[in-house]
Image: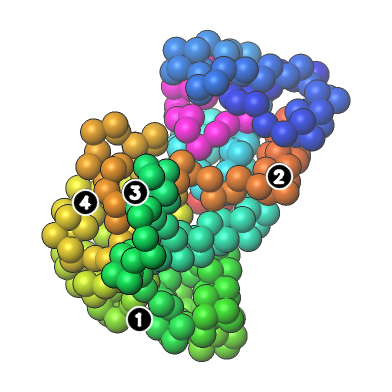
Amino acid sequence: MGKVFVTRRIPEVGIQRLMAEHQVEVWQGQDPPSREILLERVGGCTGILSMLSDKIDAQVMDSAGGGLKGVANFAVGYNNIDVQAAKVRGVQVGNTPGVLTNATADIAVGLILAAGRCFGPAIHNVQRMQWRNWEPMMFLGQEFEGKTLGILGMGRIGYAVAKRMHGGWGMRILYSARNPKNDAQENFNAQRVELDELLQQSDVVSIHCPVTVETRNLIGQRELALMKPNAILVNTARGEVIDQQALSQALEEGKLFAAGLDVTTPEPIDENDPLRLRDNCLILPHIGSATDQARNQMASMAAENLLAAIAGKPMPFGVSMT
Ligand code: DGY
């Protein structure tokens, strides 16, 4: 029997699966465990089930000790884990791909519509009892039928957003990605273009790439200046892909119509970040995968990953360690 530390409460299905074979401690705090607590609680663990908010680096792995076999992230993104440090220590790393694709794509579509149709200020208007009359000139938004959607990163989630917006709104799809995506080309007539062209031509830009050395601050002042003044920028991937200060300035100066963010840097967003209270920036607290269905499946997958690693088998949903 091994020892497993689960850094937050997750759906029971995952916990029960782990408890059937191992001694499991689940952190019950409302907030993530502090660094100090994390380092202490992983001591002697064979497995760690982590969240995207936990930095799992060499120090954490070394605090676990030589018996650590696997780190299973409760997320598809795993930029919080030092995969190289895991590799040299013979620790497997796993994630939860596929099961949150639809949930996250739905949130991206929701943000496109909500940012484009001024849901944020319109909802505040009602909540503050400022709704006086039917107004012919208030909260005028954008329509999407036949316009152009630029997908930055045509992986599973980018594809699912393209499918929704092409099928439902007849949007023309452009995408930028390292490799051509034949299924998107065949099914939505999607056209692969360079990033600058995508930004210049798109009415909506939706970000779906992981955060890497190449994509950190990929959308900065220069890139925002290339976008159409009526464009909408949506990010459901990782906050670090956008230079938030540059976005704030672009929105302030009317260089974009609106932004819709499910992710920010840091998370939660800084209280004093000017984006937080902007009318034309709709921000959600990273709820892309927040459906019962997705979270239950994520819990099962993360548990299966750890069980396999502790048993000395390859994780069924292991990440590439090259
Ligand atoms: C992920 O899985 O990476 C999402 O950001 C959270 O579910």
Instruction: Measure how far apart labels 1 and 2 are at the Cα level.
Output: 36 Å
Question: Which is nearer the eye, 265 or 30?
Answer: 30
Mark 2 CB within 8 Å of ligand 1: no
Where is 152 relative to 315, above or below? below
Q: Quadrant of the N terminus?
A: top right
Residue 148 in the image: x percent, y percent?
39, 81
Disc number at residue 130? 3
Q: Residue at x 51, y 23 (%)?
A: 32
Q: Secondary structure at mark 2?
A: helix
Q: Secondary structure at mark 3?
A: loop
Look at label 4 and name its amino acid.
Ser
Q: Secondary structure at mark 1?
A: loop
Magenta-drawn segment? 48-68
Instruction: Measure how far apart labels 3 and 4 are at the Cα level.
Output: 26 Å
Look at label 2 and name its amino acid.
Asp
Where is 117 relative to 36, above or below? below
| Mark 2 or mark 3: whose residue is earlier in sequence | 3
Closer to us: mark 3 or mark 4?
A: 3
Residue 62 in the image: x percent, y percent?
50, 20
Instruction: Measure how far apart labels 3 and 1 are at the Cα level.
Output: 44 Å
Disc 3: CA contacts within 10 A as few (<14), some (14-19) or many (>=20): few
Instruction: Measure how far apart labels 2 and 3 are at the Cα level.
Output: 35 Å
Where is 307 relative to 46, above or below? below
Instruction: Measure how far apart labels 4 and 2 are at the Cα level.
Output: 33 Å
